[in-house]
C-alpha cells in the first residue's frame, strides 16, 4: 500500500519538475502549459488511494513528500523571479513611454486589449 | 531638373540605407551564437521634405542600435553572481566534507571507537600488559586522526587562499579588458556590434566572480562598481583589487589562530566585509567563516580544537587521579603512585607567565606522551588515607576503576565526560560532520535552483530584447493572466503537500 503512495508521490514530483522546467522558460505558452501540469500534480496528490495511505500514517513516504515540497517551493521561487522580472520590465517600459509621476514612481501605462498600428 | 536629380539622389540614399539594413541583418544571422551578441537594428531616419529647397524627403540610414536592454542584462548578471556563489559553495563544502568520515570506518570517529573498545578490554584485564599497550597504541591513532583532520582542513584553507588569489587576478584581468573596450568606445567605435558583444561577455564573466554594478554612460562606455561602491572601472581608468592574509592581533583572545583572508580596494581600503557575493564572496566565507568554525580564529578556538582538548584533558584527568599501585612504597609521607597523562598538546605562555593550552593548535599538536609506558597507565581508583600507618593503602580501591570510567566516555552520564557538558565525544564529532553534510546539501539545492533561475533570466532577456511597446503591452496582459493561474495552482499544491506532511508527521 505505501509503495503505491510512494509511486503516486513520485508521479506528482515528476510533474512539478516538469513545471520547473517550463518556468525556466516563461513564455505565455509555457506558463499556460505549466498551469495544466501543476493541476495534474494536485489531482495526483489529492488522489484517494494516496490519501488513504497518508491517513494510515505511512511515515516511509515522508522523505519523498519533503522532496516534493522542496520542488514546489523551487517552482514558487521561479514563478516569483519571472513575475518580478516582468513587473520591473513593465515599469521600465512605463518610464520610457510615460515618464515619472510627481512622487517619482513610474507613470502607470494605460493598456487595452486592442493595439492598432499604422 | 533639380527635382529629378533630387529624386534620383533620394532613391540612391534609400537604396544605400536598405543595403545597410541588409548588411545589419546578415551580421545578426552570422553572430547568432556569438557570446554576448545582441541583435542590431538599423534605424531609418526620415529626411526633410521641402521641394522648394530641393529636399525631396525619403529615408536615410541612421545609427545602428543594439536591442540589448540594460535591465535584462542586469538581471542576467545578478543571477550570474548568485550562481557563481552557489557553485563555489558546493565546491568548497565538498572539499571540506571529504575531511569528515561520517561512516565511522576511518578518521576520528573510527579511532575513537577503537580507543573506547581498548578501554573496555583493559577494564576486563587491568593488569594485562597487552591490553595496556593496546590502549597506548589506539590513543596514538586518535591523536594522529586529529592531526590528519586538521592537516586536511588546513590544506583546504591553503587551496582556498590560492583560489582567492586567482579570482582577484581574473577580476583584474577582466577589468583591464573592459578598460581596453572602453578606450575603443571612446575612440568612436561605440556602435561596433562585435565590441558590444565583447563588453557584455566580459561583464557576464566578471559577474561570476563579484557583484558588479554596471552603468552605461552617455558616451557608450561602461563604469563598473564592485558591491555598488568600490570602483573597478570608470571610463578608461581601472582600479585593481589586491589580496592578502592577516594574522590575529597579538591582543586577540586567540593570537596564534590561522590568518584570515582580506581583499583591498586600489586605495588600500579593506573591503572584505562588503565582499559577500559571487565566487569571491563564497571563497572568503569559506576561508574566514566556515573553516575557522573547525580550526579557530581570533575569536574562537574551533570545534576540532575544543573536542581534542576536552578529550585529552578528560582522559588525562581520569588517568592521573588513578593509581598504578594500591599502596605506597613504605617511606615516610609517601602515597601510592599516580598514573601518568596519556595525551599532550601544544601550550603557550601568557604575558603573566601562566602556561595555557595553545587553544587553536591543540588538534594539530595532539600526541601521545612519548615517555609513557604501559606500567604508568593507572587502573586503580581509591582513596589514600594519610592517617594510615605506613605503608599507606587505598581505601575502597577498585582495581579496574579507571578503565571503566574511561570506557564510560562512549556513553556518558556525567557532564564532565561530555564536550561542553552537553554531548558525548562521538556525538559532538557526528554533529560536526553532519553539519557539513547539511550545509553541502543546502548548497547543492541552492545551486540547482540558481541554475534554473539563471537559465530563466537568459530566456527572459532573449524574450524581451527588441520588443516594441505595442507588442509589450499585449504580451504583459497575457503574462499577468498566466502568472495568476500558475500562482494559484502552486498555492494549492503547496497547501496539499504541507497537509500531507502534517498528517504523516503527527
Image (tube, rainbow, N blue to C red):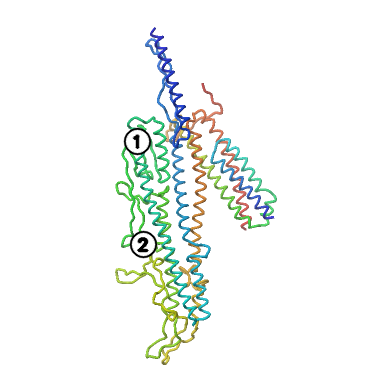
Residue B431, percent from left and from top: 50, 62
Q: Chain under label 1?
A: B
Which residue carries the number 2 mark?
A: B257
Badge 1 crowding class, 10 Å Cα cut-off, few under 14, some 14 to 19, many 20 or more, is many
Residue B52, percent from left and from top: 38, 10
A92 versus B155 height, above or below = above
Q: Report helix, strand or loop for mark 2.
A: loop
Residue farthest along the bottom direction in this orientation: B389
Residue A99, percent from left and from top: 43, 31
The quadrant the N terminus of chain B occupies is top left
Pointer 1 or 2: first along the chain: 1
The answer to whether residue A107 of the structure is visible from this angle is: no
Q: Which mark is residue B182?
A: 1
A25 versus B399 height, above or below = above
User: Where on the picture, by quarter, is residue B391?
Assistant: bottom left
Observer-side mark, 1 or 2, equals 1
| B460 horizontally vs B183: left or right | right
Residue B98, percent from left and from top: 48, 58
Amino acid at each position: 500500500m505505501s509503495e503505491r503512495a510512494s509511486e503516486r508521490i513520485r508521479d506528482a514530483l515528476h510533474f512539478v519538475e516538469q513545471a520547473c522546467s517550463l518556468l525556466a522558460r516563461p513564455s505565455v505558452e509555457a506558463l499556460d502549459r505549466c498551469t495544466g501540469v501543476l493541476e495534474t500534480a494536485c489531482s495526483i496528490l489529492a488522489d484517494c488511494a494516496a490519501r488513504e495511505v497518508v491517513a494510515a500514517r505511512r511515515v516511509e513516504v515522508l522523505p519523498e513528500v519533503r522532496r516534493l515540497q522542496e520542488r514546489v517551493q523551487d517552482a514558487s521561487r521561479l514563478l516569483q523571479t519571472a513575475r518580478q522580472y516582468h513587473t520591473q520590465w513593465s515599469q521600465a517600459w512605463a518610464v520610457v513611454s510615460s515618464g515619472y509621476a510627481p512622487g517619482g514612481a513610474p507613470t502607470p501605462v494605460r493598456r487595452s486589449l486592442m493595439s492598432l498600428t499604422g | 531638373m533639380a527635382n529629378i536629380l533630387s529624386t534620383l539622389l533620394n532613391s540612391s540614399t534609400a537604396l544605400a540605407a536598405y543595403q545597410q539594413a541588409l548588411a545589419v541583418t546578415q551580421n545578426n544571422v552570422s553572430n547568432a551564437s556569438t557570446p554576448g551578441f545582441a541583435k542590431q537594428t538599423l534605424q531609418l531616419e526620415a529626411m526633410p521634405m521641402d521641394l522648394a529647397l530641393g529636399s525631396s524627403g525619403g529615408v536615410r540610414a541612421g545609427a545602428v542600435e543594439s536591442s540589448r536592454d540594460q535591465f535584462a542584462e542586469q538581471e542576467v548578471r545578478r543571477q550570474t553572481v548568485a550562481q557563481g556563489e552557489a557553485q563555489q559553495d558546493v565546491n568548497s563544502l565538498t572539499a571540506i566534507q571529504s575531511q569528515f568520515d561520517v561512516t565511522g570506518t576511518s578518521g576520528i570517529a573510527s579511532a575513537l571507537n577503537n580507543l573506547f573498545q581498548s578501554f573496555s578490554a583493559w577494564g576486563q584485564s587491568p593488569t594485562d600488559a597487552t591490553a595496556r599497550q593496546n590502549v597506548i597504541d589506539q590513543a596514538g591513532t586518535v591523536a594522529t586522526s586529529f592531526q590528519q583532520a586538521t592537516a586536511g582542513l588546513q590544506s583546504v584553507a591553503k587551496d582556498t587562499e590560492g583560489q582567492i588569489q586567482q579570482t582577484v587576478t581574473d577580476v583584474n584581468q577582466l577589468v583591464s579588458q573592459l578598460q581596453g573596450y572602453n578606450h575603443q568606445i571612446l575612440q568612436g567605435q561605440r556602435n561596433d556590434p562585435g565590441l558590444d558583444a565583447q563588453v557584455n561577455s566580459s561583464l557576464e564573466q566578471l559577474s561570476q566572480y563579484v557583484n558588479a554594478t554596471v552603468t552605461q554612460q552617455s558616451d557608450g562606455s561602461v563604469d563598473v562598481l564592485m558591491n555598488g561602491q568600490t570602483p573597478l572601472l570608470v571610463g578608461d581608468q581601472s582600479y585593481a583589487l589586491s589580496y592578502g592574509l592577516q594574522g590575529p592581533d597579538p591582543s586577540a583572545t586567540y593570537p596564534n589562530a590561522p590568518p584570515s583572508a582580506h581583499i583591498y580596494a586600489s586605495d588600500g581600503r579593506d573591503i572584505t566585509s562588503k565582499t559577500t557575493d559571487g565566487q569571491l564572496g563564497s571563497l572568503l566565507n569559506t576561508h574566514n567563516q566556515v573553516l575557522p568554525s573547525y580550526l579557530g580564529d581570533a575569536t574562537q578556538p574551533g570545534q576540532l580544537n575544543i573536542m581534542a582538548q576536552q578529550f585529552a584533558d578528560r582522559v588525562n584527568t581520569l588517568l592521573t587521579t588513578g593509581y598504578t599501585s594500591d599502596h605506597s612504597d613504605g617511606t615516610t609521607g609517601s602515597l601510592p603512585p599516580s598514573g601518568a597523562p596519556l595525551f599532550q598538546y601544544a601550550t603557550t605562555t601568557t604575558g603573566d607567565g601562566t602556561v595555557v593550552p595553545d587553544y587553536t593548535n591543540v588538534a594539530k599538536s595532539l600526541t601521545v606522551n612519548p615517555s609513557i609506558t604501559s606500567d604508568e597507565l593507572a587502573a586503580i581508583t581509591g582513596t589514600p588515607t594519610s592517617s594510615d600507618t605506613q605503608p599507606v593503602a587505598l581505601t575502597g580501591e577498585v582495581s579496574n576503576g579507571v578503565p571503566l570510567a574511561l570506557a564510560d566516555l562512549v556513553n556518558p552520564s556525567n557532564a564532565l565526560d561530555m564536550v561542553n557538558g552537553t554531548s558525548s565525544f562521538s556525538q559532538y564529532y557526528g554533529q560536526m560532520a553532519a553539519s557539513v553534510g547539511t550545509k553541502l546539501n543546502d548548497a547543492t539545492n541552492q545551486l540547482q535552483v540558481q541554475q534554473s533561475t539563471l537559465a530563466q533570466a537568459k530566456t527572459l532577456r532573449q524574450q524581451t530584447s527588441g520588443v516594441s511597446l505595442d507588442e509589450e503591452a499585449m504580451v504583459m496582459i497575457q503574462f499577468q493572466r498566466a502568472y495568476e493561474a500558475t500562482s494559484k495552482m502552486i498555492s494549492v499544491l503547496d497547501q496539499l503537500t504541507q497537509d500531507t506532511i502534517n498528517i504523516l508527521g503527527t
